[in-house]
């Protein structure tokens, strides 16, 4: 079943929302992730990341709006689940089964199962295939879970905080495997993480959630090219606020600093302009909800 | 064959770090015409980065005429990079030295000058894009 939206992206959300009782976990979320992208999903705890991933994976029904993943509406059905890979936060493996047991079950349940590459990779990583999964290290378990998800040959892979519990070396190994899989074919990935430095390496698309709202959804290159830190002597900022989006502003008696999303060239040459890394951009967005810290006049005078 | 490294402390984005490392290897003679660059998958696997970052770097090098992608075979070095002629470079350097001396006379410290240069580079790049 192909729908007209398919050309717009491998993962599309249109006004997607989820309410638990009176509280919205995610509200009016819209974006389109083109095929082949690796999308980083960032936001504070409780921002709605897991809620979004659960809806995209078909495990949870949206209250409003709709999603489309690999040309289908996410749902709890074999025709859909066979097309995607989903790794929940708690690495869902059977601790008393061996790696081989898992591979056998995967082959039994999935018609397009292809585990040769995964087996070879796990062997290269010296992960003992006959050992019970419960006795493996966290990094090894994560690699096993990823190998199983990739062996399904999914069109879209969804990972909820896949590297949060891993040490730096295991994290790098996991992300190498993931990036290699993306280099191989047409796989589209969405993964949530708090580790922005990792995301900046492996992602080329980014979605920022805060307080159930979608603040940003764009290609990483565009995000980096349009966000700047402007600093200068304190003066009227109305022109900047009119032409661009000011995410955060800090004023002292004498100086203004503004974290800005530019919507065109900056005409005023008097601002000192600096590029921003993804981490600084995220912080500017995630601080949006809280009141802008304006240094009180008193502290300035007291110096 | 060469390997690439990325540092978080570089002022350059990852794809430009790769471009720069290929150029340096070419200038130093570590890479020569006819040599094959690592495949996208090899680079991605060793650095844990997005494949598009490597593709973008290789496309940049291709546009400069330094390498050539051959379908299904790989990316190969075609020639050494040519910067501005030594005399042009010397002239630019003299002009910069004059400007730096002027800035120092006006009271700017080295750090101030560096940050001014960086700011001008960023804003001219923005005008070019927008």
Image (cartoon, coloured by chain):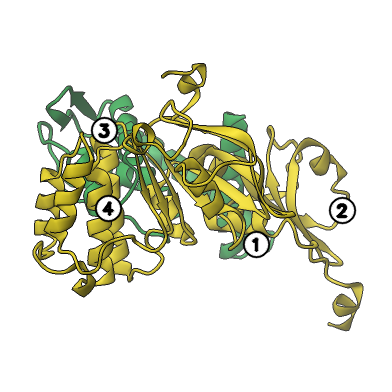
Q: Chain of mark 3?
A: A
Residue A302 falls left or right of residue A36: right
Q: Which residue is mark 2?
A: A235
Q: Secondary structure at mark 2?
A: loop
Image-quadrant location for residue B102:
bottom right
Q: Which residue is mark 4?
A: A146
Q: Which residue is mark 1?
A: B108
Residue B93 falls left or right of residue B47: right
Q: Chain of mark 4?
A: A
Q: Dot 3, crowdedness within 10 Å: few (<14), some or many (≥20)?
A: few
Q: Residue visible at 61% across and 50% down?
A: A209
Q: Secondary structure at mark 1?
A: loop
Residue A178 visible from this viewpoint: yes
Nearer to the camera, A222 or A252: A222
Q: Nearer the viewer, mark 1 or mark 3?
A: 3
Up-down relation of residue A257 to residue A226 (above or below): below
Residue A66 place in picture, x, y as percent? 58, 32
Q: Dot 1, crowdedness within 10 Å: few (<14), some or many (≥20)?
A: some
Q: Nearer the viewer, mark 4 or mark 3?
A: 4
Quadrant of the frame with the N terminus of chain A: top left
Residue A295 place in picture, x, y as percent? 83, 70
Whichever of labels 4 and 3 marks the residue nearer the N terminus, that label is: 4
Up-down relation of residue B24 to residue B65 (above or below): below
Residue B21 place in picture, x, y as percent? 27, 47
Q: Residue visible at 62% across and 43% down?
A: A216
Q: Which chain is yellow?
A: A
Residue A296 falls left or right of residue A65: right
């Amino acid at each position: 079943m192909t729908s007209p939206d398919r050309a717009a992206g491998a993962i599309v959300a249109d006004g997607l929302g989820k309410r638990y009782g009176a509280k919205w976990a995610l509200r009016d979320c819209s974006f389109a992730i083109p095929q082949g992208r690796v999308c980083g999903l960032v936001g504070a705890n409780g921002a709605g990341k897991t809620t979004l991933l659960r809806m995209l994976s078909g495990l949870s029904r949206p209250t409003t709006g709709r999603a489309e993943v690999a040309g289908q509406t996410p749902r709890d059905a074999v025709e859909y689940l066979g097309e995607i890979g989903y790794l929940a936060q708690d690495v869902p493996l059977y601790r008393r089964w061996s790696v081989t047991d898992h591979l056998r079950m995967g082959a039994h349940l999935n018609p397009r199962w292809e585990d040769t590459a995964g087996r070879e990779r796990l062997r290269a990583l010296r992960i003992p295939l006959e050992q019970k999964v419960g006795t493996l290290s966290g990094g090894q378990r994560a690699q096993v879970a990823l190998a199983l998800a990739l062996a399904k040959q999914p069109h879209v892979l969804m990972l909820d905080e896949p590297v949060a519990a891993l040490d730096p070396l295991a994290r790098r190994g996991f992300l190498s495997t993931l990036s290699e899989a993306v280099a191989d074919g047409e796989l589209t990935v969405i993964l949530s993480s708090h580790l922005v430095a990792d995301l900046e390496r492996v992602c080329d698309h980014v979605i920022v959630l805060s307080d159930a709202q979608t603040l940003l959804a764009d290609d990483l290159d565009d995000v980096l090219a349009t966000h700047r830190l402007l600093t200068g002597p304190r003066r009227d900022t109305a022109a900047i606020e009119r032409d661009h989006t000011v995410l955060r502003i800090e004023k002292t008696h004498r100086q203004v600093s503004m974290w800005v999303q530019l919507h065109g060239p900056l005409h005023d040459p008097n601002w000192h302009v600096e590029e921003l890394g993804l981490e600084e951009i995220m912080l500017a967005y995630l601080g949006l909800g809280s009141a802008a810290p304006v240094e009180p006049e008193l502290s300035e005078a007291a110096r | 064959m060469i390997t690439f490294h990325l540092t978080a402390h570089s002022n350059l984005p990852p794809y430009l770090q790769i471009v720069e490392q290929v150029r340096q290897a070419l200038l130093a003679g570590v890479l020569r015409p006819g040599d094959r660059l690592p495949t996208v998958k090899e680079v991605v696997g060793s650095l844990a980065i997005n494949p598009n970052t490597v593709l973008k770097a290789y496309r940049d090098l291709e546009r400069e005429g330094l390498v050539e992608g051959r379908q299904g075979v790989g990316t190969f070095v075609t020639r050494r990079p040519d910067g501005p002629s030594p005399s042009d470079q010397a002239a630019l350097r003299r002009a910069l030295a004059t400007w730096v001396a002027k800035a120092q006379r006006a009271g700017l410290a080295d750090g101030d000058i560096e940050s001014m240069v960086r700011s001008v580079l960023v804003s001219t790049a923005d005008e070019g894009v927008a």
